Image: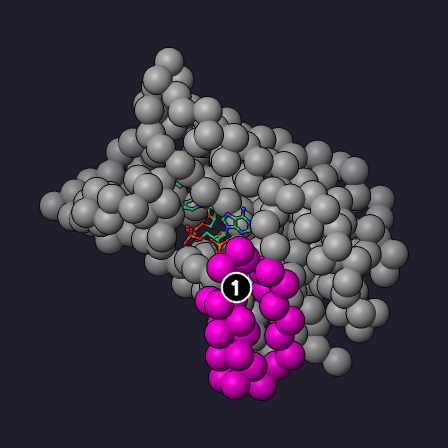
Amino acid sequence: MNKIAFITGATSGIGKASAHIFAKNHYNLIITGRRKERLDEFANHLTDKYAVEVLALNFDVRNRVEVEVAVRSLSSNWKSIDVLLNNAGLAVGLTNIQDGVYDDWERMIDTNIKGLLYVTRNVAPLMISQGKGHIINIGSIAGKETYSFGNVYCGTKHAVDSLTKAMRIDMVSEGIRVTQVAPGAVETEFSNVRFKGDNAKADSIYKGFEPLQAEDIADAVYYCANLPAHVNINDMVIMPTAQANATTIIRK
Ligand code: NDP
Ligand code: 8X3
């Protein structure tokens, strides 16, 4: 029987690339995201391309009730989840705290921290009931360092770093593996979202050096998820070769 991976934020970027690699390796998938049309089209594409079963769950991770209803709606064959990839997340805006936009702060905190917690709170008991499972959280270099104007986004990713450690402590006795994968600059829709549709500004972030691609992170996620059962990667920080830390990128 195929294993099952539950991937949040699979309509784009790292989540989408991860869905490809898990499906290619015969996992059945539960994929989630808010953009329903994209999500459904992607589910059909994966089914056609890889001949695996794909269930598309269209919900907003910020909405606790939607998360609960979506996970409770799973039929028993879909409940035996092997891997949860907590990937859905975003940065919005890049300003000083003193000029901060409340709505941006709330979107980041509600998505990156509370959304990740809501999904985990609902999926982890399913894993515990089967005595195995692997939770992989997508953190960031922003959860290891703090950079100018990154304030609240960095705070949310520091929270992911801390919550990953907490999940590991809380569930180690249940046989659940918990991993953080923390990337540097990855060329996805991330900067288009951060700069609120200013695509020229977003593109400029990845100019003059070779950034990571979503597939690079997906490869690492898949590697972590498919180690022998007694092996757990706690934390993996992945950077473009041209990037030394959050603020040092060598551009030609
Ligand atoms: P993308 O913008 O390409 O993808 C983000 C995904 O998250 C989309 O599928 C989006 O789907 C989903 N998402 C966002 N908000 C919500 C929500 N409220 N409910 C459900 N799904 C949501 O960016 P990335 O692939 O780059 O980002 C993925 C993760 O990687 C994020 O956690 C990000 O912080 C992290 N990261 C990214 C880095 C980068 O440089 N790109 C570096 C380090 C970490 P939809 O809009 O359809 O809901
Ligand atoms: C995304 C990477 O450096 O923009 O998490 O924070 S960074």
In percent of width and height, residue 149 lies at 34, 24
Q: Residue at x 26, y 33 (%)?
A: 248
Residue 40 seen from this side: yes
Extreme-right residue of the structure: 129
Q: Is residue 147 visible?
A: no
Image side of residue 129 versus residue 234, left or right: right
Residue at position x 61%, y 47% in the image: 61
Picture quadrant of residue 234: top right
| Residue 126 drawn at (x, y percent) | 81, 56
- Magenta residues, as a range? 31-58
- Residue topped by disc 1: 36
Relative to 83, residue 76 above or below: below
Closer to us: 191 or 213: 191
Query: Across the whole image, how many numbered discs are drawn on residues?
Result: 1
Q: Quadrant of ligand 2?
A: top left
Is 28 on the left or on the right of 73, as rendered? left
- Is label 1 in a helix, a strand or a loop? helix
For the point 71% across and 58% down, the residue is 70
Q: Quadrant of the N terminus?
A: bottom right
Q: In the rendered image, which quarter contains the C terminus?
A: top left
Where 58 sits versus 60, above or below?
Answer: below
Q: Is residue 54 magenta?
A: yes
Q: What's the amino acid at mark 1?
A: Lys
Vertical side of 135 occupied by 49: above or below: below
